[in-house]
Amino acid sequence: MNSIRGKWALITGATSGFGKATADLLAQNGCNVIITGRRAERLEAQTNILKEKYGVHVLPYCFDVRELGRSVEMANDLVSREIVPDILINNAGLASGKDKIYEGLISDWEKMIDTNIKGLLYTTRSILPMMVTRNEGHVINIGSAAGHTVYPEGNVYNASKFAVKALNEAINLDLAGTNIRCCSVDPGAAETEFSNVRFHGDDEKAAKVYEGYKPLEAEDIADIIYFIVTRPAHVNISNLLVYPTAQRSVYVWGKKNS
């Protein structure tokens, strides 16, 4: 087992869902964390909780991953502090809208493409060169089962997560010959704020997504990420597709009547 105690992990989108649960678990195991998020109050609260609970170093950066300049500023600040992340977790992502492609909102499309694809690229381009120079580190990209199979009315979200899958494979290839590992974790149905965001804050629609079965929880994905980053240095898990037991594909379910 590879200990993460005393190392630094950078987690984007760390104020909710997978990112928040992962930051908590890594900090619980002695890892210092660099956390990003758009919501200043949540970010500040998360920073204070992690420091007080686990006694680790926490560096918060409040910005949207769609802003390239802010990613560069964060990277420059880390350089000035002589901190090179040992683990980069590209977690920030979302689904916005669930419409047929000829009825979709352009604003939803741009939000998903800019966050899920360009945001991942901006953060990776800003941080990965430091890791390459040191020739050590681990990149984790949060993808989705939606990046493996297209489903009705998923269109642009599916496309963005297919892109994450392709980029994860490309990063792995580009890192050949280095000691840096790269993995995508691709969850199926998971109960976080995901559906609430997808349905633009419609709580009733969001709740129906999780009726009749036990979905994945944020802590399940955090556990998986912790497992990946603690494998021995010669072990590179390149992709994990994870469903709740009731879901066997994006089409096949064992839901119970509610």
Image: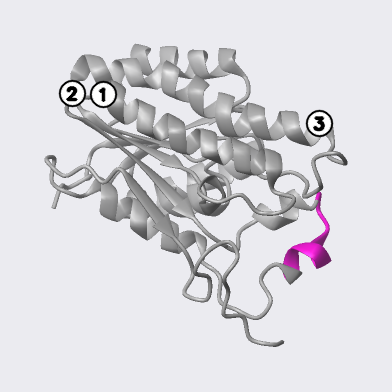
User: Label 1: how many residues lie within 10 Å, few (<14), some (14-19) or many (20+)?
Assistant: some
Q: Is residue 164 left or right of residue 169?
A: right
Q: Main secondary structure of the magenta part?
A: helix
Q: Position of residue 200 (x, y in %)?
A: 81, 49
Q: Position of residue 67 (x, y in %)?
A: 62, 19
Q: Position of residue 182 (x, y in %)?
A: 31, 36
Amino acid of disc 1: Leu
Which residue appears at 79% of the width and 53% of the height? Answer: 199
Residue 22 drawn above or below residue 104 = below
Residue 131 drawn above or below residue 162 = above
Residue 175 bears which disc, if any? 1
User: Label 2: how many residues lie within 10 Å, few (<14), some (14-19) or many (20+)?
Assistant: some
Quadrant in the picture for the C terminus: bottom right
Give the mark nearest the N terminus, 3 or 1. Answer: 3
Residue picked out by circle 3: 107
Q: Which element carries disc 1, helix, strand or loop? A: loop
In which quadrant of the rendered view does residue 76 lie? Answer: top left
Q: Which element carries disc 3, helix, strand or loop? A: helix
Label pair 2/1, CB-CB below 8 angstroms: yes
Q: Between 158 and 223, which is closer to the camera in this rendering?
A: 158
Which residue appears at 35% of the width and 57% of the height? Answer: 224
Residue picked out by circle 2: 178
Residue 198 belongs to magenta span: no
Which residue range is magenta in the image?
Answer: 200-207
Amino acid of disc 2: Thr
